[in-house]
Amino acid sequence: MRYLTARKRAEGNGASGTGTAHHWYMQVSAVALAFMVPTLLYILGSAIGGSHEEVLATFARPFPALLTGMTLFVAVLHFNKGAQMMIEDYARGSMRRALIMLVIGLSYATIATGLFALAKIAL
């Protein structure tokens, strides 16, 4: 015999079974990106037009390097969650699982490649 009512079991879960965690993650990462992307664009814009050594010197400083790494990480994970949500809405069956695995793999490969390239430039 169940002691929880149907309402108590459903409360906070939403349609996907994860509650509002996904929504809040997307909201927080969107706000973070709203501050990080313009700052990164300013740094990139000031580096454009400089010599190769000047660009390397720009990204060898801690703030531009950390901001670039954080922006890359947060933006790709934001893409990952959004694409996964879109796939869950429109794909079914084994194609759904395959596409989700592809998007997750692509996202982490992009993060790893970007951070490796940033480390090669910054160090």
Image (cartoon, grey):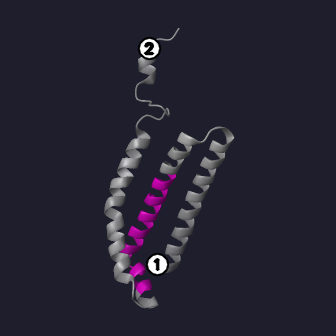
Crowd tier of the residue under label 1, counting other residues whose Cα lies within 10 Å: few below 14, some 14–19, many 20 or above: some
Residue wearing tag 2: 5
| Vertical side of 112 occupied by 12: above or below | above
The amino acid type found where label 1 is placed reads Ala
Residue 20: x and y in percent read: 40, 37
Residue at x-position 40% and y-position 25%: 11
Query: 120 and 6: which one is in front?
Result: 6
Q: Is residue 111 left or right of residue 71?
A: right
Residue 1: x and y in percent read: 53, 8
Given the current orientation, which residue lies at the most extreme front position?
90
Residue at x-position 49% and y-position 79%: 121
Magenta span: 55-80
Q: Looking at the image, is mark 2 or mark 1 earlier in the sequence?
A: 2
Q: From mark 2 to mark 1, how far is it between C-alphas?
A: 57 Å
Residue at x-position 38% and y-position 68%: 67
The nearer-to-camera label among 2 and 1 is 2
Q: Is residue 123 visible?
A: no
The image quarter containing residue 63 is bottom left
Residue 60: x and y in percent read: 42, 80
Residue wearing tag 1: 122
Residue 47: x and y in percent read: 38, 83
Mark 1 element type: helix
| Vertical side of 19 occupied by 38: above or below | below
Residue at x-position 49% and y-position 59%: 76
| Vertical side of 59 occupied by 30: above or below | above
Q: Is residue 46 magenta?
A: no
